[in-house]
Image: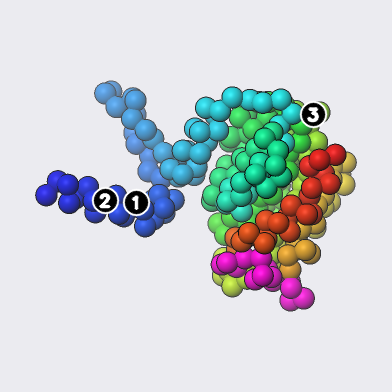
C-alpha cells in the first residue's frame, strides 16, 4: 500500500514537472529550523539556484541569463565553448534574476547575454513596471561587475499566448533598446528575426508558440555569435 502511494506521488510530480507546485511558506518554529522552505519563485527555481551556487567559478565566463527560453539550451555545446554558462531558470522573472544575481556576477564574467521579461507579462505586470525592474537589474549588474560586457537581448514574440501580448512585447523591447542607449550597452534585436509579418513568433522556430525548437536556437546562435567570440 505504501509503495503504491509513493508511485502515485512520484507520477504526479513527473506530470507537473515539479514546476506546477505552488511555493508554500513553512513557518520557522522550534524544531523545524532545518526544513526546506520554498521561495516565492517555486521549487524548480530553488533547485536550479542551489545548483548554480554549488558550481565553481571559471575565468572568462560567458553567461546566458534568463528564463526557460534560455534554460532549455545547452549553450556550451551550441557554441563549442566550455566557458559559456547557462544561467536560465524556467519560469523566472526579473526580480527572480535580481534575487540570484550574486551568484551570476561572482565570477566577474567576461560577458552576460540577458533575455528576461516575458514571464513578467504573464504575471500581469505592466510595461512600465517591467522596464523599471529591468533598469534596476542592469544597473545592479553594472555596479557589481563593471568590466563585464552586458548584452541586452530583446524579448521574443509569441503566438497563441493569451497571457502575453505582442504589442506589449514590442513596447518592452523599445524600452530595452532605450536602456541600452542610456547605459552604452549593446542591444540585440532578436524579435525581428523570429517574427512573422504579423509580429507573431514564426512557428518554424517554435514547438508551442513560446519556447524555441532546435532551429530556433541555431538562429539565435547565428544572431549572437559575433558578440560571443569577439
Do the CB atoms of the residues marked 2 and 1 lie less than 8 Å apart? yes
Write the residue at 47% across / 38% down.
Answer: 46
Q: Which residues are magenta?
A: 196-209
Label 2 sits on residue: 9
Label at residue 146: 3
Label at residue 136: none
- x, y percent for residue 140: 71, 33
Task: Let me know if residue 181 appears in the view.
Answer: yes
Q: To which quarter of the image does residue 105 belong?
A: top right
- x, y percent for residue 203: 65, 71
Write the residue at 87% across / 47% down.
Answer: 181
Residue 204 part of the magenta-drawn span? yes
- Give the foreground label among 3 and 2: 2
Crowding at dot 2, Cα within 10 Å, few <14 / some 14-19 / many 20+, comes out as few
SS for callout 2: helix
Left or right, residue 97 beside residue 178 = left
| Spatial separation of the CA atoms under disc 2 and disc 1 | 6 Å
- Give the foreground label among 1 and 3: 1
Crowding at dot 3, Cα within 10 Å, few <14 / some 14-19 / many 20+, comes out as few
Label 1 sits on residue: 13
Left or right, residue 212 beside residue 218 = left
Please, is residue 59 above or below residue 41 in the view? Answer: above
Please, is residue 50 above or below residue 211 in the view? Answer: above
Amino acid at each position: 500500500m505504501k509503495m503504491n502511494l509513493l508511485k502515485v506521488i512520484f507520477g504526479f510530480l513527473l506530470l507537473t514537472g515539479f514546476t506546477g507546485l505552488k511555493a508554500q511558506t513553512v513557518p520557522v518554529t522550534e524544531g523545524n529550523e532545518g526544513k526546506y522552505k520554498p521561495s516565492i519563485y517555486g521549487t524548480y527555481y530553488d533547485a536550479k539556484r542551489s545548483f548554480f551556487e554549488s558550481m565553481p567559478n571559471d575565468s572568462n565566463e560567458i553567461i546566458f541569463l534568463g528564463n526557460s527560453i534560455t534554460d532549455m539550451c545547452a549553450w556550451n555545446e551550441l557554441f563549442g565553448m566550455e566557458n559559456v554558462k547557462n544561467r536560465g531558470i524556467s519560469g523566472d522573472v526579473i526580480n527572480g534574476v535580481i534575487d540570484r544575481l550574486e551568484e551570476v556576477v561572482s565570477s566577474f564574467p567576461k560577458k552576460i547575454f540577458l533575455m528576461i521579461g516575458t514571464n513578467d507579462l504573464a504575471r500581469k505586470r505592466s510595461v512600465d513596471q517591467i522596464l523599471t525592474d529591468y533598469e534596476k537589474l542592469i544597473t545592479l549588474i553594472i555596479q557589481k561587475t563593471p568590466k563585464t560586457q552586458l548584452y541586452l537581448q530583446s524579448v521574443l514574440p509569441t503566438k497563441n499566448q493569451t497571457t502575453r501580448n505582442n504589442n506589449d512585447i514590442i513596447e518592452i523591447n523599445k524600452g530595452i533598446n532605450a536602456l541600452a542607449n542610456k547605459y552604452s550597452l549593446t542591444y540585440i534585436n532578436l524579435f525581428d528575426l523570429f517574427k512573422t509579418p504579423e509580429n507573431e513568433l514564426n512557428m518554424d522556430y517554435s514547438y508551442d508558440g513560446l519556447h524555441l525548437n532546435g532551429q530556433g536556437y541555431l538562429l539565435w546562435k547565428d544572431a549572437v555569435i559575433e558578440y560571443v567570440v569577439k
